[in-house]
Image: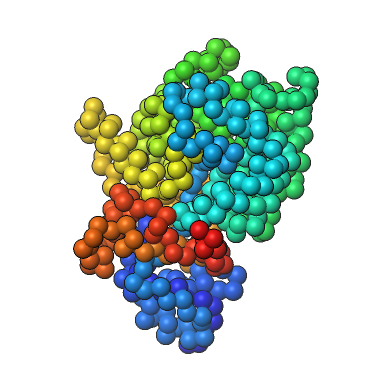
Amino acid sequence: MAGSGTILRGRIIHAPVFGSLREWRDGAVVWDANGLITDTGSARDLLARNLDARIIDVRPWVVIPGLVDTHTHLPQYPAAGIGSGELLPWLERFIFPLEHDFRVEQAERLAPLFFRELALNGITSCAVYSALWEDSCHVCFRHAEASGLRVTMGKMMMDYATYSETAPVRIVEQSLEETDRLCRQWHGRDNGRLRYAVSPRFAVACTEQLMRGAAEIAERHGASIQTHLAENGEEGDVVAHRFPDALDYTDVYDRCGLLGPRTILGHAIHLSDREIDRIAESGSSVAHCPTSNFFLRSGLMDLWRLRDAGITVGLGSDVAAGPELNPWRVQRAAIETRNALAATKPTTPALEPRHAFHLATVGGAQALGRGDETGDFEVGKQADAVVLNISAVAPPGTDVEALNADEVLALCVWRGDARMTKRVFVGGREVGIKDY
């Protein structure tokens, strides 16, 4: 049978089911002119069925689905790895001033570098907190559009301790108006490759009026919501003081209408059983940010506790509290978090590289509401793929081609970085990374 489209041939590894891998040592992914996957499997079989297809042969390199970063902050990137202390003092000293100064000129300089570095790290889909300022946000979206990546992003919203140049009585109204305008312009661009995320920072920095207004905008436009939840003990104490009538931190968001299937909750470390049950019931997802949690000494998130409750969990770099965009380092930290928890809770199930890889692909895609688009190489999904040269990070003398799939992923998780990334495809279109 003759066919057409594109065939990407290499060693195919993906994890459509949590805890298991699928692999073809000489495999292929086939996509059509619209970038939709039409077949995945043995290269010999697919070549015979698609005689007219364009062939991209990357053997012996490995081909994986595009990785997903569910939580990161574009304006904060210059502060990655800088400073110390716990969350609230770190924000006050390092981050709030940096975000205040993130104007158009800074956005024009940083945004294209940020998105290119995401691609260089093999990240094809992401959820991003953008600038405080509307004009700077437009710049970030313009560069997101040019990047070719799948970007869910929104203006940072806050009205406590905010750096607003408007009279205080106008802060909430201004923030909501700007968010609504940005959402109307950017949500759904390029057939949904760009999405808007209404982004109230967290209950420490937002009044009930602002959070309710944010939820209404998201509902009106069908946009995502992203915020931070229960990252730090001191943060929880501040929220309890400011919202004394709420049952707990999660209930603050629930009463404001911020929970739901399009909501991504960052961190979610210090939660009661009631809160976990309510998050699961609402369909909200969680962005697990283990490198950030280590950097700010925020605590150890019990991944299994959330997953056992039925909560979708993806992984996030949380730059700049997370010191780098490297998704393999985040997967490694997720495993290290589990190992640390097991020291005091020995019954905690093991978390292996294959589990972390699923969280960084399928789990992340589901958390962003893109599970029907990306995350693995199932037929009908978008052709988001990353080509890796594993030898770039292997110890000298390693016979990479002799490694099994679990060993390949272990090498990526424990030693991997951007040196491995050779080519990146989003929706079948190649994203340029050669500027590096």
Q: Position of residue 366 (x, y in %)?
A: 49, 49
Q: Residue drawn 72% across and 25% down?
A: 164
Q: Residue drawn 53% across and 31% down?
A: 228
Q: Is residue 250 visible?
A: no
Q: 118 or 154: nearer the eye?
A: 118
Q: Is residue 347 above or below residue 68?
A: above
Q: Is residue 329 visible?
A: yes
Q: Position of residue 206 (x, y in %)?
A: 63, 23
Colour mapping used in the image: rainbow
Q: Residue drawn 68% across and 25% down?
A: 163
- Count of numbered badges drawn on the protein: 0
Q: Position of residue 313 (x, y in %)?
A: 44, 42
Q: Is residue 39 above or below residue 396?
A: below
Q: Is residue 54 above or below residue 132?
A: below
Q: Residue drawn 50% across and 25% down?
A: 90
Q: 1 or 339: nearer the eye?
A: 339
Q: Is residue 267 left or right of residue 111?
A: left
Q: Is residue 307 above or below residue 187?
A: above
Q: Position of residue 356 (x, y in %)?
A: 35, 47
